[in-house]
Every structure is written in C-alpha cells, then in structure tokens.
Amino acid sequence: MDVPRHGVARGKKIRRIIYGAVVLIALSFATYGLSTLEPAAPDVERATLWVDGVKRGPMLREVRGLGTLVPEESRVVPATREGLVEQIRVRIGDTVQSNTILMVLSNTDLEQSVVDSELQVRAAEADLANTRAQLQSQVLNQEIVLASAQAAANRAKLQADVNQELLDNGLIGDLQVKLSRADFENLTAQIEMEKRRVDIYAKSAEAQISSQQTRVEQLRAVVELRKSQVEQLNVRAGASGVVQQLPIQAGQRVPPGTVLARVADPARLKAELKIPETQAKDIVLGQTASIDTRNGIIKGRVMRIDPAATAGTVTVDVQLDGELPRGARPDLSVDGTVELERLDDILFVGRPAFGQTGSTVGLFKLTPDDQAVRVQVKLGRS
C-alpha cells in the first residue's frame, strides 16, 4: 500500500527556485561580460583596397585637359556685295595666296551702275568744256572792251597834249584844253573800271570751272568705286594660308556679310585645352605646358585663359614653341598638360577620391601586422 511522503512537493519547488535563480545570475554575468567586450575588427580583401605610401621628395603639380589644335590667326572672307555665286575656283585644303581668287560672283545691277556712272562722267566733262569755252569768251570780250578803253584814253591824252601846245602858241582857247583833259581823265577812270570788271569775270570763270571740275572728279570717283565693287565680286583670299571652310555652293545667292570662306595659316597653330573648372584656379599666364599630338610632344606656354567657364570647363590657349610634329593640323585632337609648380622636399601621397585641398579627412594607416588604424590627415595642395 502507498505511504504518503510529507514535504516532497515543497522540496521540489524550492529546488526549482534555486535552479532558476542560479540560471538568472549566470545569464546576467554572461550579458555583462559580453557587453564589456570590444567588437572584433572586420576583415576585408586586400585586393579591393587602394593602398599608397607616403613619400618625401620633389613633387610636380600639373593639370591635364583634352583639346584641339586651332590656327592662331584665321581670316574670314565675307561677301561685301550681294551677288550670285557663278564659280568656285578652290576646294577645302587648297593652299592659296593673298591675291588668289576663291570664287566669282555676279551682280547685274552693280555692273549696270558702272556703265551709268561712266556716262554721267562723260556728260559732266562735256558740260565742263562748254562752260569753260563760254566763260573764256566772256573774259575775252571784256578784255576787248578794256583794250578799246585804253586806246580811247591814249587818243584823248594825245589830243590833250596837242591842245596844250596850241594853247601855249595862242592858237586855241583855254576851254578846249580843259575839255580834252576832262575826256582823258574820264577815259582813264573807265579803264580802271574795265580792269576791275575783267578781274571779276576771271575770278567768276575760275570758280565756275572749279565747281564743274569738282563735279567731274566726284563722278570719276563714283566710277572707280563702282569698278572696285565689281572687282570685289572676284572674291580673293586676302591672306596666305589653307582654305579651311567653304560654306557656300555654286548658284547660291549671297547677301552682304555672308561668310564665303575661311583661310588660316596651318604653320601657326595653338592648342585650346578644356580644363575642369575645379582645377583651373591655379593656372596663370606664362606657365609651361606640353601638348601630346599622338605623334609627338611639343612644348608651349599658357597665352590666354578664358574668363568664363562653359559646361564645367575653362578654355586655356597654349602657344606652341618650336617645330610642329608631322601630322599636326587644325582641329586635331590633343592631350595637354599644364605644369603648375614644382615642390621640393615635401611629404606627399596619392590623392583620395573624397579629399579636397585644405580639408581634414580620415584615412587608415596600415600597421606592420596588417591592421588598419584610422587617423585624421590634413590634405595640402593637390
């Protein structure tokens, strides 16, 4: 038969409480111990890292940019008069001289104006000849009147002298002598008036002829101008070089100011480099540059810096020194490098992708046991 055991259930309950308390105390100690532990350093593949060493010595600061070769001087040949393109005598790439005719235009109105101007000159010349003849005739007639007055005065003087002798001899009276002298004095005054009239006629004739002559010369100048405008229809290069552009076609009518051609000297080229605006702040005039034409490297100097940025770049013109490599021609793509400065005996390292000049960034320094320790580094010029 079963015998009841008193106190067993109570003992089990006490043991369970003791076991639970021990477990709770153990978990507390384990949690505290884990919280005081430092996190383990993460591992990373070395091949995925970019590692560079800090060096001491000289460093060359430079910036690079892509660009093209362009002529230092190019001449745009515009249309000075409206015309129809009848003939194009050159092609792109042809070598021309300053007097080489690039193309021939035609303008019937301009050619007709030359003929009209020449006819006006002939009419003005005929008017000038007619005016000169009429004025010379008037002056001549006045000179004849002057000569007649002088002859009459001479006769009056002779008569007065004769009457004076007769008066001295008592052959005539005093009245006749006075009348003859009055006639002489009247004719002498008339001579002076006729001389002044001749002088006035001569000056008037000279002024009228000069006016007509000026008109003739003016019309001749118009003829020369019209002829020069017709001559300009033979479009000339105006400078020695190579034809770079011919943006028109035969049969096309062009208004004044239209660009007919562009001529440049291929022996005088410069490089136009596109430098990122963030790197162009240290570029100054006169800095040394080198231009890689893919067929040789040529030295140069910065000659101009564009004051404005376009599409995130600044245009820098480099004047080339020395002989151009073979194959160098306008619009050739080049790679340019501008030397900013040379620094001696400095510490330098490869530039981090996220670092800017003058900023302080966090970098990792490798220890001999391949552990990476973060350090703060202040970056200098780049």
Image (spheres, rainbow, N blue to C red):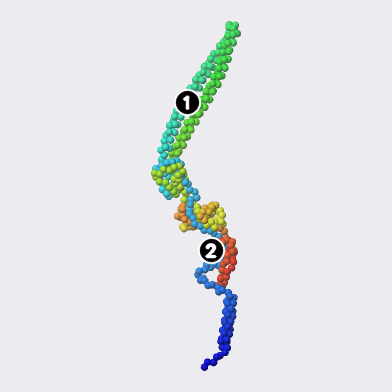
Of residue 298 and residue 310, the one placed in the foreground of this image is 310
At x 58%, y 62%, the residue is 359
Q: What amino acid is at disc 1?
A: Thr
Between label 2 and label 1, give the one nearer the viewer.
2
Q: Is residue 83 above or below residue 244?
A: above
Q: Is residue 21 left or right of residue 335?
A: right
At x 39%, y 44%, the residue is 251
Of residue 252 and residue 160, the one placed in the foreground of this image is 252
Provide residue 72's location: percent of width, then percent of height.
50, 50
Provide residue 293's location: percent of width, then percent of height.
47, 57
- N-term mark: 2 or 1: 1
At x 44%, y 45%, the residue is 260
* Residue 369 visible in the snapshot: no
Provide residue 64's location: percent of width, then percent of height.
52, 58
Residue located beneath label 1 in the image: 131
The secondary structure type at the circle numbered 2 is: loop
Q: What amino acid is at disc 2?
A: Ala
Residue 353, label in figure: 2
Q: Quadrant of residue 199?
A: top right
Of residue 200 and residue 281, the one placed in the foreground of this image is 281
